[in-house]
Amino acid sequence: MQEINYTDHPSETLSEIINAIKPDKVFYLADSNTAHHCLPHIVGPDALCHVIRAGEASKVWETLVDVLQWLSVSGCTRHSLLVNVGGGVVTDLGGFAAGIFKRGIRFVNIPTSLLAMVDASVGGKTGIDFNGCKNEVGCFVSASRVIIAPVLLRTLDVQNFLSGYAEMLKHSLLIGAKNWELHIKFLEDFHSASPFSEDFMQEMLQTLQPLIQESIAFKQRIVTEDPTERGLRKCLNLGHTLGHALESLLLTKGTPVLHGYAVAWGLVACLFISASSYGFSSDILRITARNVMENYGRPAITCDDYDAIRRLLLHDKKNISGQIRFTLLEEPGKMILDAEPSVNLINDALDFLREA
């Protein structure tokens, strides 16, 4: 199982890990936001650092080549260590670079966003977007260590916080009804507290820490049982099949959204399909949809976008023989893998998203 280090002192924890690994050189990858807000709290000014532009637009082949070029000309060897300091873009792209450079070097993830803490930095999925599709190119390769430092979440704005929380809401639906209730209560409190005082933000982080650990522990358990997504791990795609399509569509339309927003909408759509086909609770659908719409808004799509969304869905990696596969639910904690909803039902779910 991938080793997770929870800490309030990421710099000290990283130093201990480096002393244990004993690399010949240490390289640091960050984006333009984390280089400013987080990296100075972790490493000194003389560290070997490469900074990429913040945002999903950097998770592409050209950026990957730049990172590989930097590692090569800077003398990185198979005995070196890459430390990824950032959100999902940095950990996905940095992990992929480490997995293929010199046929694989060790790397450590220090996720700085909630999304990266509970999703991208854990589980061994790495990669880039390609040809207009999310995560089209990549590989499974696990970090040597992952450092979870909730103190770094103080640098997040509300939108990036909510983006990460969508993944925790997804995990709660997979864990069971009682866990879902805790997360819905958190979302309700979060929405009612706006604008946020410093005292509320501090209280929020304290409430969040055990929920983060529970979310990560759930994902670790699933990934350990099915590391390369041949069976049970497919449950982690709840909300992602349609979410990725929405994310890709909105990016090409010039109205990009954060990953977690697309996942939140994808979750609501999947719950609608689950209620329509498998008897999922209409009350849980209604409550989840209300909280998602209050916090995340609605996707900026029309019925004219449905054909483009379907074309994007056909690129999903879970498809078999051109048939779109979804993860759905009979009830919280009871998953249905490889469901095949009809085109009409998918369109009905998109209608629900636009009108809920």
Image: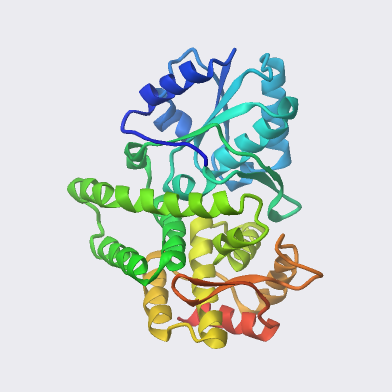
Image label count: 0
Q: Is residue 250 left or right of residue 209?
A: right
Residue 345 in the image, given as x and y percentages of width and height: 63, 84
Residue 82 in the image, given as x and y percentages of width and height: 58, 26
| Quadrant showing the C terminus | bottom left
**Location of residue 193 with respect to 78 vertically, above or below:** below
Residue 298 shows in this picture:
yes
Residue 41 shows in this picture:
no
Q: Is residue 278 left or right of residue 342?
A: left
Residue placed furthest toward the front: 225
Q: Is residue 335 left or right of residue 158?
A: right
Q: Is residue 298 left or right of residue 320?
A: left
Residue positioned 41% across, 24% down in the render = 42
Residue 209 in the image, given as x and y percentages of width and height: 31, 47
Residue 218 in the image, given as x and y percentages of width and height: 45, 55
Display colour scheme: rainbow
Residue placed furthest toward the right: 321
Residue positioned 58% across, 78% down in the render = 350
Q: Nearer the viewer, residue 56 or 236?
A: 236
Residue positioned 36% across, 77% down in the render = 287
Q: Nearer the viewer, residue 72 or 145?
A: 145
Residue placed furthest toward the left: 199
Classify residue 51 by image quadrant.
Answer: top right
**Location of residue 313 with respect to 45 vertically, above or below:** below
